[in-house]
Amino acid sequence: MKNKKLIITAVAILAVVVLGIKGKGLLEQRKEEVANEPLPATAEISVEVTKAEHGVLQNSLSFLAEVLSDKSIKISTKLAGYVEKVLVEEAQKVKKGDLLVVIDSVELKSNIEALESAREAQESDALLAQSIYERNEKLYRIGGISKEKLEISKVTFELKRAALENTKEKIAQLKHQLGYLKIVAPFDGVVESVLLHEGDLAAAGKPIIAMSDHGKKLLFSFAPDEKKSIAGGQRVFFGNREIGYVKSIYPSAKNGLVAAEVTLSEKLSYPTGTTIYIDVLTRELEGCILPAGTLLHKKEGTYVMVYDDGRFTPARVDVEIETKERVIVTPCPKGFIALGSEAKLTKLQALDRVNVLGETDEK
């Protein structure tokens, strides 16, 4: 039994040794085969090249703007009274001085008539007092009356005359106030809304008519962090058409947004209250222009890949202004510049074989 176990062990050891020797031989054979295989050809990629050109780039920001009347007011009366007539309707065009509303003037005219009657009586009293004073003055010269009596007649005449002048002034004031009861258009424009109608009580300062002129302006809002980009005088575009400029930036924010007003240099056919998209030109620069697809961003900075003498080498540039499609850089790189994805641009320097598209004989 013991001899049988020894035999089995010896056979197993021998088998392991044989397998090890055979495996080593196979491994050496495979290494030799791999070493003799030809190296795979380096992959060839194609890249388009372009050249820098001189030109102008613009940066702009888009905003939603509201069309408003350039001048919009609400007209009221200085004197309370009932509305007698409304002579206009909404959307009606009016000229400066056109009569819009008539306020009832019965009470005011009644007061004027009462003062006119008082004036007539005061004029008679003043004339009588004047004649008495003039007569007493003659009598005093010949010693017919005392100086005291003369002074009394003089004071009486002056009081009567002062009362008459006071009444005349009151009449003039009331007649002037009659003008407040006839409300006229302060400028050429259009009636936006009629707020009170015939029979309504028009209190002093309470709006009766709202109107605006024919001019228009734009108002747009932006976040406070954009305030450094928006400034007065910046040009404003609607589509590809320049329509005005930023007139002012309002000092107070509303709902957390800053508002800016645009003065229009061209007429807009849109009614007030309409919203349109505008572009505000924030920056304009002239310089060396390249497609945005030529830029390669690295930790050290921004580069372009310059093609020269059959190879691509990186050249560092500074981006001065950038749009979605083009950039202005300094310094301006000479020769052909690679155009492609950043993944492709990164590989160019390490490749020996690159199929350059768009290359010419021009150097």
Image: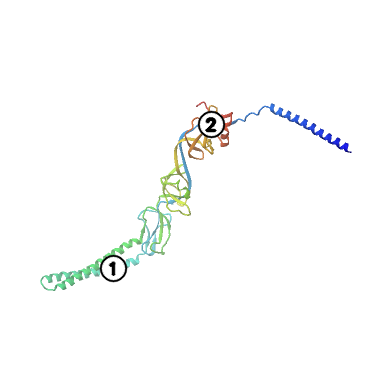
Residue 306 placement (x, y as % from top left): 52, 31
Which residue occupies the foreground of this view, 25 or 238? 25
- Which residue is at the far left? 142
Callout 1 secondary element: helix
| Color encoding of the figure | rainbow
Q: Three-letter amino acid code at disc 2? A: Thr
Q: Residue 115, labelled with which disc?
A: 1
Give the class, few, some or many, for how many residues have Cα within 10 Å of label 2's Cα (few <14, many ≥20).
some
Tell which tag, 2 or 1, sits nearer the viewer. Answer: 2
Q: Is residue 212 above or below residue 10?
A: below
Helix, strand, or loop for circle 2? strand
Nearest to the observer: residue 17 or residue 236: 17
| Distance between the alpha carbons at the discs numbered 2 and 1 | 101 Å
Considering every residue shown, the one lying at the far front of the view is: 2
- Point 56% across, 31% down: residue: 349
Q: Which circle marks residue 82 in the picture?
A: none
Give the mark nearest the N terminus, 2 or 1: 1
Q: Tell me which residue sits at (73%, 29%) in the image.
A: 28
Say the numbered circle drawn on residue 313.
2
> Residue 146: x, y in percent?
13, 73
Disc 1 marks a residue whose amino acid type is: Leu
Residue 52 horizontal side relative to residue 115, left or right: right
Q: Label 1: few (<14), some or many (≥20) within 10 Å?
A: some
